[in-house]
Amino acid sequence: MQLQKNIKTIEENLSGSDCKLIIVTKTRPVEVLQEVYDLGYKTFGENRVQELVSKYEALPKDIR
């Protein structure tokens, strides 16, 4: 799965730093967010309130 591979590569590059990975969901459909959530990631960033509201309704409530 390419998405999982890309995230793991980013995490490896951040290893040892004080940085935290935030998954930015701008313009991505709920299905992609759910896929990332299912990989164990729960910290997401969204810059449009309209998108956040619609995505929030469709996703698990423990997302940050």
Image (cartoon, helix red, strand yellow):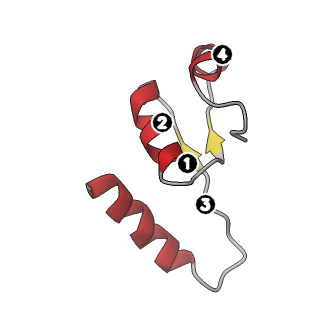
For the point 66% across and 81% down, the residue is 17
- Where is 36 relative to 29, above or below? below
For the point 66% across and 48% down, the residue is 43
Disc 4/disc 2 C-alpha distance (Å): 15 Å
Q: Are marks 4 and 2 in contact (CB under 8 Å)?
A: no
Q: 31 and 44: which one is in front? A: 31
Q: Earlier in the sequence, mark 1 or mark 2?
A: 1
Q: Position of residue 55 (x, y in %)?
A: 57, 21
Q: Secondary structure at mark 4?
A: helix
Q: Are marks 3 and 4 in contact (CB under 8 Å)?
A: no
Under mark 4, the amino acid is: Val
Q: Are marks 1 and 4 in contact (CB under 8 Å)?
A: no
Q: Quadrant of residue 20?
A: bottom right
Left/right placement of residue 19 relative to residue 41 reads: right
Q: Earlier in the sequence, mark 4 or mark 2?
A: 2
Under mark 2, the amino acid is: Gln
Label 2 crowd bin: few (<14), some (14–19), many (20+), radius 10 Å:
some
Pointer 3 residue: 21
Pointer 2 residue: 34
Disc 3/disc 1 C-alpha distance (Å): 6 Å
Q: Which mark is residue 53?
A: 4
Pointer 1 residue: 23
Under mark 3, the amino acid is: Leu
Q: 32 and 61: which one is in front? A: 61
Label 3 crowd bin: few (<14), some (14–19), many (20+), radius 10 Å:
few
The mark closer to the camera, 4 or 2, is: 2
Q: Position of residue 38 (x, y in %)?
A: 49, 46
Q: Secondary structure at mark 2?
A: helix
Under mark 1, the amino acid is: Ile
